[in-house]
Structure formats: structure tokens, C-alpha cells
Amino acid sequence: MHKNFYSRVNETVYDEVLDNGMKVIINPKPSFNSAYGILTVDFGSINNLIRHNDKDIQVPAGIAHFLEHKMFDKKNYDISNIFAKYGSENNAFTSFNQTSYLFSATDKIQENIDVLFDLVQKPYFDAKKIAKEQGIIDQEILMYQDEPSSRLYFDTIANLYPESPLSNDIAGSVDSIAKISEADLYNTYYQYYLAANLNFVLVGNIDVKQVINSISQKEKELNLTNKGNMEVVNQLKSEVNQQIEASKPISFNKTSMQLETPKVALGIRGPYNQISGKQFARNELAMGIFLEMIFSEDSDIYQRLYSDQVINESFGYDFDMEAGYQFIIFASDTNEPEKFYQQIMIEIKRVLNNPELIFNQFELIKNEEIGEHISMMNSVSATANQMGDKLNGYTNLFDEVDMISEMNFTEVIDFAQKFFAGSSKTINIIE
Amino acid sequence: MEVKSKDGVHFNYKKSEKFKSIVITIDFVEPLSDNNLEKRTMVAEMIENYSNKYNSKLKVAQKLAKMYGAQFGTNVFKIGEMAVLRILISFVNDEYLPNNADLIQQITEFLHEMIFNPYFETNQYPKQIFKLHQQNLINYLQNLDDNKKYYAAKELSKLYFADKPQNSNSIFGDVHKLKEINSKETADYYRWMLDHDEIFVSVLGDVSSSQLKKIQQQLDFKPRKTVKNLVVNLQSSSKVRERTEVVQQQQSILNLAYEIPVSIKSHDYYAALIMNAILGGSPLSLMFTNIREKQSLAYYINSSYKSTLGYLTIQSGIDGENYLLVRKMIAKQIELIIQMKYSDDLLENVKLLMISDYLTKFDSDRQILNNIFIESILHQSINKGDWIDNIKKVSKKDIAKVAKLLKLKAVFFLKGENNA
């Protein structure tokens, strides 16, 4: 295990890549009561291709999320009941790019880790179990479709990348999950649940030595050692990225949900991005700072838009950067959607042409970002979710504090100018 | 823990080296009154955004950013029949900051300014600014109903508290009344509230005694009468009220409310907590297992127990056609608890989970502060060991006894009909 001490924030991180390719990261927090363990598979809703008999075939949309649900349901028992014996909370979630399984516990940490590793192994699917799960997930899909904010967000992404894997709901549709078969689940599982495609993060009150020992023991027991297949996984992922890249944005869309006040989103799709490692992390932070300089409450641009009633408290934005795509979504509730998206675009253009307009904001936003990063360290789960991933070269929360301190204004503006120069946009209104 | 108290002003400090931040809350408490809710909502909004010195949202936001992204905000909430306006500030402990900034000094001056020097021009908030925030709040409140889960919960509460509507009123007040209030009466109310509300100041973090003194000096509230103790006034509603509403959406929402006259001060309290966890308050619950996992009738189906008002609610998202079946299944799960027909393992596991959740609560600065406040307002503190022992002691019989007290009083069904 490598040990890395961050003196400025008094934190220690241990990390190692096991022989089977799995990454392990540990951040002990001895003064806390709980420990939080999260096991992530780099496989999410966009990864709907598998290689079968040398052919790449498509599996039904929503399969990653379906697998996430079904992994708990073993042949003769439910994993949740084992976690329950150890008094822990457990959960799982699926996003576009990853599936994560986690527990939070105050006792029997070692046992909980064992259960978490069992969870991603020994899959068991049969027709009856699948049919039952379809009923539950149908209700989950319908619930999200009735939530206007969720619809706004996901429909906007779908319009930025139409008919690509990003345009499907993470959970799929009622129709697509009805097509999921036993064979689809097994094939997809064996394709993506590889040790080298997994990482495990543990944060909180733990006995470091004991955990390290047990994990090296675990490695020998793990049935997930199909290392050679990572090459295929990487090829499949890049095929998916190409599909996403090839899609052409739809510029405008309007839906009716009988809302009190219309919701509008402006989606901006950045250029295809092939950078990874530490530079990826820097770019992500740079773009975050750029947007904060314009659209955080401490910018005079934000305040002017607020006074002119272009935006209000419901205003928010989200910037997402991944291997195959990067986008920003600005959203607000407003009776004047045109005014909203036109003004946002005008402000961005103005700043890109005259970066000196926001220079005064730079140190201020850096201070703010540093403080916010340090505050995140107060939470075991927030820390665990910020320990980095393969794509950003495992840049964690603690590294980011230093990265932000070192960031210069030119770097931030350069990245933003490149992003917007190669961008396209979509407008989405729900009323 | 209470380091200093004068009439109606309580000052609590909890030392903790666990967190890299220091958090201070100031809670203004008064009995719920229909006349004041809208003004309190506006006051909270104005305190968060303006003071005499920082007379624009921008100046406040920039000052906070300068103080290394200190988080400052206000919110309003209810506890039992009390209205609370909370001011919270959270900031990084100097120890972790690059250049030995004396943040506590700046923070306490800032707090003093935001509370004691409101942005008044000729004794009231500048009218235009007041109007802007008022309009934004009105819009915000009107839009809340677009979230159908929120709407269904609100309608259920209206049915349950039909005899005592102040308990179902939104803590933000009524939109129509909010439209009517003006800057002058809101400012007058704030001055009154500043002198009359009971005050609870709570500080959490690693703070020296001289720093603590600084905080106390800057937050020098005048003595005032104590508000009566937090009334735990358990409601009972005379009849069962049911209402169905049809909307155009995919899913239907079924919400139920039961009377359960067990307060936080009752010795059945711990049994009621566990009963709720077994019924629908935890992922191990009977409703989750039997209605979701075994029958696939819902994606979510939970219960929650409100000890300060003595009721328990159930919320679920279902297919409209299964309405009767789900209602029957819910009643059946309560019956199983009364008849003690569930495994000993379930009881043991629920207890373990509750104890673990309880201990995990002390890993969150916000939750610790909330705990300090609640203990202070209830004049009741309990140590961790006792809480855990009380949970461990509860038997199936104790749980059956509280389950028998459940009386269904309100049903709200939001029936989704998708014509699209």
C-alpha cells in the first residue's frame, strides 16, 4: 500500500492496485463513529454493448441499473439481509458511467466489507426473479417521469445527444426493461464486472492494518480476475463514446406537464474530449471556477440577472465532464424562457470576449472553493465519493485543494474558450 | 453543555475536534401563530441577503466568499407547535487555512451585523428590494405543488388536521397572505421578534474559551420572557377523512395518516420508534419486504412517525389499479405487528440498524447541532448509552402495544391518469 500524507489538511490516504487490477483507496478518520465503503464498477447506463461470439451486440437500455437491483438477490438469500445482521445501511446507485454499491456502518466493518465483495460476485438470475424486478423498476421509472425537474434534466441531455446511449433514461423504459432476459444479464455481468474494472474506497473509523490484510486475502478469493478482457471492455466503451460523439443535437423542444410556472433549460454540449489523468481533473476544476466566476451569487453578473428578474432562486446549473462527453445545463423556473436563455448566452459571450471583466472574481472564487472542499471533508460519505477515479488519475478531494491553490486565471480562461468555441446548444422547455 | 443562559436566551457549546469547520446556529422560537408565518418567511429571506453594511446580495455573497466560502443561510421550520427561524453559519477552522486568517473574529462581526443591523431605510426594508424577494417567494411557493409527492403530503396533512388547521399550514405561510404583507409591517415584526422570541445559540467545533467569549459578546441578545415549554400536544381527530383527486400523470400516490398518541416524553417512545422502523421506516420493514419486494406493488413505500404531533404517515407510489390491494396489504402489516408475527431476527436487526444510524448521526455537524437545540428546547437530554439501552430493552409485546394505538384518520389518494 502507498501512503500519502496531506499535511495541510491532516489527512492520510492509502492506495494500491491489487494484482488482479482492482484499485483500493483508504482514508482513515479515527475520530468519527462510522465507516463508509463503496465499491464501484466502471459500467453505467450508457454501456449497452457487449461482445458475444466476436460480435458487438446491443443489450436493452436500463440493463446496468437492472443488474444493480438484481445483484442483491442471490440464489437462496438476499444480500440486504446479511448487511442487516451487521446493523449497517446499504445502498446502490447507477449513473451514466458507473454502478456503485455501498454500506455505512458503525460496527463489524470487516464483515461488512466481506458482504460488499460478495455482493458483486455470484450472480443468480432466473425468469421469476426478473419478472418481479420488472414490476418494481416500472414504478421507479414512472415516478421519475412524473417529476418535472428530473424530466427537464434528462430530456435536455437526451436532446444534446439524441439517439445515442446518453439519450436513454438511466433506468431504461418500461418497454426496454421488459425485454431483458436471463442471458442478457449474465452476458453483461461477465463482460463488465471484472476486477480491473472495479475500485473500492473505504473512509471513516477503521483499523487500517486489519483492513489492508484482509483485502490482500480477499484478492485471492475474488472470482473476478478476468484481466485479459479489459481490452474488450475498453473497446466497447470507446464504441459507445463514438456513438455519443456522432449524435447531432436537437436545438429546441417543448413539453407540457401542466406546470404552475414553466421550467427552462439551456444545454451546452462541449467538444469531444480525450484528455485523462491529472489534466482531466485540472480542466474540470478550471471549468467549475469559470462558471462560478459568472454565475455564483458573488458575481455582479449574477446579481444583475437576478435584479432584472432573468433568474431567481430556482436558478441552477450543472457541469458534467466524462470520457466521451462534457456538457453544462443551466435551468430555471421562469415565465420568460426566451429572455432566460438569451441572456445567459449573452453573458457567457461577453466574458469570453473580455475575460478581464471577471478577473476580480478569480481569487475570491478560489478562496471559496478551497473552503468548500475543506468543509466536504467533514462528511465521511462526501469524502468517499470524492476519492477520484481512473479517468481523473485518482485525483482526490485533498489533491484538489492544492490544485485549486495553484490554478491561474489564464489556464481557466483558455479552457473555457476552447470549450465554448467547439460547443453546440439545445433549449428545452416544460410548461 | 449550556454554558450561559439568561432569561429566554440560551447559549450552548459543544467541543468537537472531529470537524474541520465551526458551525453556529441561532434559533428564534415562538409559538406557531397564523398571523406571523408569512412575515417570518420574509424576515428569514431578508436576513440571509442584506444588512445595513452589506446592502446588496452581492456584498453579502462576496463577504462570505472572502471568508473562505463560509456558508450562511436561514430557514424556517416547525417543531411541534413552535415556529423556528434558524440562522446558520459554517466556516473553516483557522487551523486548516493557508495564511492564519482570524476567521472567528470576522465571522462574529458578520453575524452581529446581519442580525442587529438590518437593511432599513426610514425604519423599513427598501420597498423595491422587499417586493422582488416577496415575488420570488410567492413563485417558489406556487411551484412547490408541481412536485406531486410534496403536494400529496400537504393534502394528507390538511385532512388529518382538519380540526386544527394551524398544524397543517405550511411553515412558509399562505401564498395569498404573503402577497398582502408589506415592508413596514415586516420590519416592525422583525424588531418585535428580535426582542421577544426565545433564543437558542449553539456552537459546535474546536473553539477556545476566548473565542467563545467573542461569539457571546457579538450575539448579545437582551433578556426576554421564556416561551412556554415545547408543548407536546397530541392531536386526535374525530373522524376518518378520505379524499381522492385525479391528475394527469403516470403514477398514483397513496398517503395515509394514523393517530398514535405517544410523545417523545412518553415511556413508549422507544417502542414507537421501533414499531415505525418495522412497519415502514427502514429498508428491513414489513411493508418494504411484503409489498415491494414480494409483490412488486410499489417502488417506494415508507412510514414516518412524528413524535411531536403524535401521528404516523405512510407514503407510497403505486399503480392506480392496485389501490385497494395496497390498502389491504398495509392494514395487514400493522396486524402482523400487533399479533407479533414477524421473526426475532427482524426485531434484532432493526435495533442494530437504529443504533448504527443513531451513532452515525454524531458524524454530522448539522445533526449534532440540531440535537443540541432539541435537547435544549425540550429540557431533556439523554446520553448515548441510555438511548441505546432503551432501544435494546424494547420487546415485541411493547411494540404490539403501541401498534394497537394506531388509528387510521386520513387517506389521500392522488390518482394518476395518463391521457397523454
Image (tube, rainbow, N blue to C red):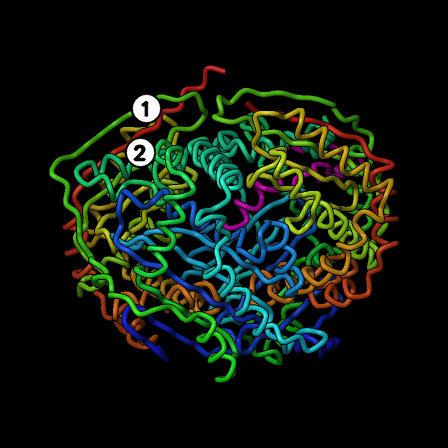
Q: Which residues are magenta?
A: A45-73
Label 2 sits on a secondary structure element that is: helix
Quadrant assignment for the N terminus of chain A: bottom right
Q: Residues within 10 Å of mark 1 (few under 14, many from 20)?
A: few
Q: Is residue A320 above or below residue A346?
A: below
Marks 2/1 same chain: yes
Taking the image as shown, residue A247 lies to the left or right of residue A253, namely right
Q: Is residue B257 above or below residue B53?
A: above
The residue sitting at the bottom extreme is B209
- The chain ID associated with circle 1 is B
Residue B418: % across, % down: 45, 19
Residue B180: % across, % down: 37, 33
Q: Mark 2 — residue?
A: B155
Residue A198: % across, % down: 69, 57
Cα distance, mark 2 to mark 1? 10 Å
Frontmost residue, A39 versus A246: A246
Regarding residue B280, the answer to whether it shows in the image is yes
Regarding residue A117, the answer to whether it shows in the image is no
- Whether the residues at callouts 2 and 1 have beta carbons within 8 Å, the answer is yes
In magenta segment, residue B195:
no
Q: Is residue A189 above or below residue A2?
A: above
Could you tell which of marks 2 and 1 lies nearer the N-terminus?
Answer: 2
In magenta segment, residue A47:
yes
Q: Mark 1 — residue?
A: B245
Taking the image as shown, residue B19 lies to the left or right of residue A301, namely left
Residue drawn at point x = 40 percent, y = 68 percent:
B201
Taking the image as shown, residue B79 lies to the left or right of residue A350, namely left
The residue sitting at the front extreme is B122
Residue drawn at point x = 25 percent, y = 55 percent:
B308
